[in-house]
Amino acid sequence: MYRKEIKVLDCTIRDGGLMNNHQFSNEFVQRVFQVVNASGVDYIELGYKADESQFSRSEFGAMKFCSEKDLEAVVGKVEKNCKISVMVDIGRVNPDTIIPKAESYVDMMRVATYVKDIDKAIALVNQIKAKGYETTINIMAVSHARENELDEALIQVEKESGVDVVYLVDSFGALYSEQIAYMAKKYRTLLKTREIGIHAHNNQQLAFANTIEAIIQNINYLDGTILGIGRAAGNCPLELLLGFLKNPKFDIRPILEILETDFVRLRKEIEWGYTIPYMITGILDLHPRAAMALRKSENRDAYLDFYEKLTNEANF
Amino acid sequence: MYRKEIKVLDCTIRDGGLMNNHQFSNEFVQRVFQVVNASGVDYIELGYKADESQFSRSEFGAMKFCSEKDLEAVVGKVEKNCKISVMVDIGRVNPDTIIPKAESYVDMMRVATYVKDIDKAIALVNQIKAKGYETTINIMAVSHARENELDEALIQVEKESGVDVVYLVDSFGALYSEQIAYMAKKYRTLLKTREIGIHAHNNQQLAFANTIEAIIQNINYLDGTILGIGRAAGNCPLELLLGFLKNPKFDIRPILEILETDFVRLRKEIEWGYTIPYMITGILDLHPRAAMALRKSENRDAYLDFYEKLTNEANF
């Protein structure tokens, strides 16, 4: 029997866009929107709402900005079954440019933050909430957070924010399922009146398993991406999540179709997913940036040297 | 703190050999043996002990047969830290050709069986045990076993066999961690005087997660392969397992080295690992043979049609 509170959020275009500065073609973004919309998935996250005075459209694709015009070009006249989400980064969005929800294609805005910026995140999320949007706070890199500071941040979010959902984000793909269970219990205990979400990375091939563990721990908001596309090792594969969930409203078939028509080719053009350098940063609980740099260098497969360097650095 | 009872078995050459009729070069098999031997892994499974009157050396590589001469060519004069395992299939081995353990390079023989053949497996394992070998019974396709028949088989193994280890084998990569936990408890309850092992497949990217779940459930024998090589979606990646286990005797570095020198190239020559057709047979709890045939056909990426065919067939 399925749990009707479970919501699936597809962030294929948003997290996948981190690999190519959001330079997907309009047609591709439209097709992803259409198949996700047809699959019964609850939310689709299309990109960021980045400040146009800080970032240039000559360098980044439209989904870095997600203006109403950009979103209209994606959604067009399609009957919308899924809600639209965009992500906002603290300091990279101009809150004054956010129009009221009633006038926007956007249904939900997700604020990405580290524990240390939680005050800024709460202020921003309250501004966005006041304009009528559903909101989330996504606390990144939770595997690096000091426990007492994370606890304080969660207590503060519960007390001071109007946020709907707080996400547990394993940015480095470092956590095992037992650690996800431990964190999930903490979130549930300290955030009694909010929903909890999970955003997992696949450095150790645990993104799907950790998402299942989150479900077991009563986490209801689940992020996935088609073929696990996303930064570095990528995310929980949406197709696996839809294969697992029992709610009859989900239909895996539109996702299988786009996997066939678009993702076989895309995977040849952009690299993401499990590779040994991302595995190494995962087991060492490090940001994948060193592995991403390695994969772009001529030493892309120099695994042993990469491991030795990172573990020697870790000794200082 | 690590659990000293845990034993890791690398079956890179044995399960990987299912993808190319065991036609690896001698040099490659030697190198895999050397790095596994250097990594602290407890056992290496090199292949099958197949009946030479049933199978031809013109069709299959040496590790299909694992004669003493074949094994000498691999192990040579290397100081052996890990034990040598070979697999035997019921009806495909001639037990009379098995020499006493004291005269053999082999330390352990693993008998692969379905529940329905458990009587034959017990008879064979007892013959092998009498010759001095460590033995296992690997019960395949446990996701398809009828529960009462599996229970009876396990009770019978406990009562009638001298086997050391009984393996839980998720041949179709269909089981979720909760189901692994359920099965593991059953094995532990019915096989009080034996060790239990786990051999997981990666159709749903759960092989590593399910192996961790097995560890939590006090399973001590763990199969892995380098880069997860193995039939179809492959196995639990050995590098992930060594990254997880805390016993200081394990050293991931020799494995990283061969990943770099040999497996980048090998993965371009042979396909294994997570692909959508194997994911589909996994979620449908089916043998991967239809997916393997698809991957060899010109329609290798016709995912939706493949899914529709399998689900329509399942309705009859």
Image: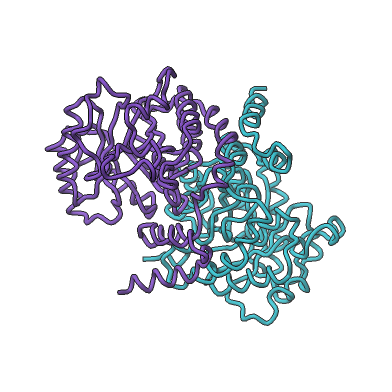
Chain colours: A cyan, B purple
Left or right: B97 in relation to A86: left
Image point 68% across, 39% down: which residue?
A300
Residue A27 seen in this snapshot: yes
Left or right: A69 in relation to B86: right
Image point 53% across, 58% down: which residue?
A222
Q: Quadrant of residue A165?
A: bottom right
Q: Quadrant of the C terminus of chain A?
A: top right
Residue farthest toward the front in the current orientation of the protein: B58
Between B298 and A14, the one nearer to me in the picture: B298
Residue farthest toward the left in the current orientation of the protein: B160
Looking at the picture, how far across and down is residue B59, in whole percent? 39, 45
Image point 40% across, 62% down: which residue?
B290
Looking at the picture, how far across and down is residue B18, in whole percent? 40, 46
Q: Quadrant of residue A74?
A: bottom right
Looking at the picture, how far across and down is residue B162, in whole percent? 17, 32
In this rendering, is residue B132 above or below B49?
above
Image point 59% across, 49% down: which residue?
A273
In this rendering, is residue B247 above or below A258?
above
Looking at the picture, how far across and down is residue B236, in whole percent? 44, 42
Between B251 and A169, the one nearer to me in the picture: B251
Tally of numbered discs: 0
Left or right: B242 in relation to A306: left
Residue A143 seen in this snapshot: no
Left or right: B172 in relation to B97: right
Between B197 and B286, the one nearer to me in the picture: B286
Q: In which quarter of the image is the N terminus of chain A?
A: bottom left
Q: Quadrant of residue B90?
A: top left
In this rendering, is residue B113 above or below B128?
below
